[in-house]
Amino acid sequence: MEKEIILREMKILIEKMQIQIRDEANQSFGSLDYHLKDLEDKLLTETYLSPLYNIKLPRWIGEYGNTKIEEEIGNTAGKINRFIIEYFGGNDVVNEIRKEHNKKLGF
């Protein structure tokens, strides 16, 4: 997996989130705004390129009854999370890194 592919997908996700936020018929009550700002910050600082990073979305994304764009947001975020795991060597490698990180934090 190449860094440029992850970057492209992050930009696509941001665009989809912006479309949803602007749609007055499908209000996200500010929760999507919050997650969009976090995502934009991660993109600017490139902190998404970490085996510890996982895209966070409001929990209502992915629930039954979501609009087409909300489904696309959830699917794109899941795809990016999988790409990041692949970028860092796969599930086993990333899980080990995360386990060591959590151990250092006392969990």
Image (cartoon, helix red, strand yellow):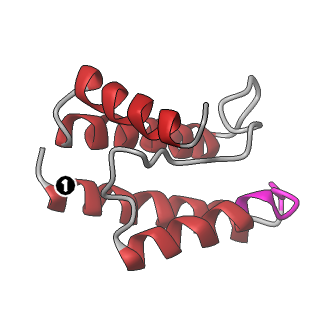
> Which residue does the image show at 29% across and 36% down from the upper left?
85
The 10 Å Cα crowd at callout 1, few under 14, some 14 to 19, many 20 or more, is: few
Residue 9 horizontal/vertical position (percent): 32, 55
Q: Kindly identify the amino acid type of the residue bearing the numbered disc 1.
A: Ile
Q: Using the image as rendered, state which of residue 12 and residue 87 is in the foreground.
A: 87
Residue 33 horizontal/vertical position (percent): 72, 67
Which quarter of the image is occupied by the C terminus?
top right
Q: Quadrant of residue 62?
A: top right
* Residue named by callout 1: 5
> Which residue does the image show at 71% across and 71% down from the upper left?
22
Inspect the magenta stretch and tell me whether residue 36 lies in it.
Answer: no
Residue 1 horizontal/vertical position (percent): 12, 43
Q: Quadrant of residue 94?
A: top left
Q: Is residue 31 left or right of residue 98?
A: right
Inspect the magenta stretch and tell me whether residue 30 lies in it.
Answer: yes
> Which residue does the image show at 48% across and 44% down from the upper left?
54
Q: Which residues are magenta?
A: 25-32
Q: Work out whether 19 lies above or below 101.
A: below
Q: Work out whether 77 lies above or below 82.
A: below
Q: Is residue 54 left or right of residue 30?
A: left
Q: Is residue 29 left or right of residue 87?
A: right
Residue placed furthest toward the bottom: 44
Residue 25 horizontal/vertical position (percent): 83, 58
Tell me the element at label 1.
helix
